[in-house]
Structures are given as C-alpha cells and as structure tokens.
Amino acid sequence: MNTVAVIDYGMGNLHSVAKALEKVAVDSRVVVSADPAEVIRADRVVLPGVGAIRDCMAEIRRLGFDQAVREVVDAGTPLLGVCVGMQALMQHSVENGGTDCLGIFPGRVGYFGDNLHDPISGERLKVPHMGWNQVHQTINHPLWQDIPQDSRFYFVHSYYVQPEDQAITAATCDYGLSFSSAVTHNNVFATQFHPEKSQHVGLQLYANFLRWDGNPA
C-alpha cells in the first residue's frame, strides 16, 4: 500500500486535508507527519499551509522540512503544495516585510493591494480574495483529469504567486488581475486554492494526485 504524507510543521489545515485525502484513498495510507525522515520515505507528499508565510517558513526550517522537501523533489516523488504551501515553493514573498521561501520554483509572491478593482465593472474588490472562483486550466495535466474547464474552487488568500517562467503555470484565475492559481514542473504540482474546501472537484484533484506517478505527461 502506498503512503501519502501530509507535512505537519505546526501550521496548516492538516485535519481537513488528511480527511479529504482519506475520503478518496483507495490503495493509499494517509499519514500526518512531523518527521522529515518519514516524509522522505513516503510515496507522495502534501505540503499544506495557512497563515503568515514568515511563521510558516520559520517552522519549516526549524523542523528540517526545507531539506526534506528538496529531497522529495530531487527524488521524483509526487509533491502537492496547497495554498501557503504553494507560496512556500517560490523564492521570495513580499509578506511580512519580505520572506525568503524554499526556492523550488523561480519567482515571487506578491500582494493584491489595498485598492484592488474589477477591471471591467470598476467594482472595488475585497482583500483577502475569499470564496469561490473559476480556475482556467492552461495545460493538460494528470491532476486535471475529469475536472471540467473553468470549474470553481475555493480560495482564501491576500498574496498570489508570480512565477518567473510562466510556462510552469498550470491554471489561472481572475481577481482584479490574472494570477497563477496552479503551477507545476516535473513531479511538483501546487494550487493556490483549497481542494479540501472545493467539494467534488477538489476531491477529484486529490484522487488524481493519489494516482499520479509524478510524470507531467
């Protein structure tokens, strides 16, 4: 039986992520782990996250998960980042006055701003971006299997990923501007939205992840 490890660094919606994975797991065992060695041994890994990036990165480094994530990536093990877990994969975030992240993907994490408006209606948009929004798939990928184009997923965030190479963008979303709502390269896939809060399409994405061998084709 395969093992999927949800990284426990003391911050994140671990319970809901694990429960969603368990709901769709057929031949996989879901573990929530604070042990970097156990994470490295797992067949698949999920890096969740909520809260401030500075605190998340401090705990990731203190517990040794920065090196563990790099070893997982280098080994070709399928890795899924979720929300702040996605942002943590970038090089740098402007949040908290500037925070260096894991640097798995070249790029930064920017702020929506305090004066965000819909470019068509002119309506002022609230930050954080919270609630359901359409996700437009920009590439074919195994994690999009059986998920209709422009499906609605659930978001909660004030900061958004700005990849240096737009070729890693797997989906976009519009909220005052167009931003990367999912990114991928080789065995890594990450989403700004919360699959565990996105009902049937979110569960489908988790089910796809549990079947994924890390090959982008």
Image (spheres, rainbow, N blue to C red):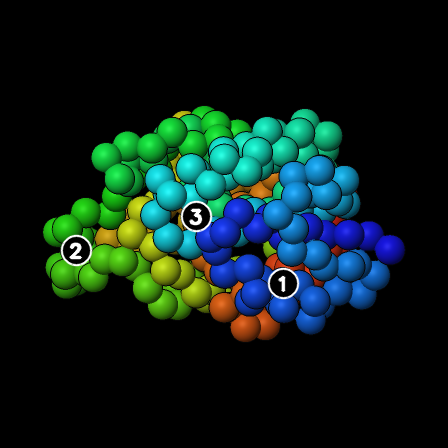
Dot placed on the residue nearer the N-terminal end, 3 or 2: 3
Dot placed on the residue nearer the N-terminal end, 1 or 2: 1
Give 17 or 184, whichever is nearer the viewer: 17
Which quadrant: the N terminus?
A: bottom right
Q: Residues within 10 Å of mark 2 (few under 14, many from 20)?
A: some
Amino acid type for the residue under numbered disc 3: Val
In this view, 105 is above or below 12: above
Amino acid type for the residue under numbered disc 1: Ala
Amino acid type for the residue under numbered disc 2: His
Please name the residue that numbered disc 2 is placed on: 117
Residue 160, x across and y down, in percent: 35, 45
Please name the residue that numbered disc 3 is placed on: 84
At 63% from the left edge and 68% from the top edge, which residue is drawn? 19
SS at badge 1:
helix
Please name the residue that numbered disc 1 is placed on: 18
At 58% from the left edge and 43% from the top edge, which residue is drawn? 189
Query: Alpha-carbon distance for marks 3 and 2?
Result: 24 Å
SS at badge 3:
helix
Which quadrant: the C terminus?
A: top right
Residue with the most extreme right position: 1
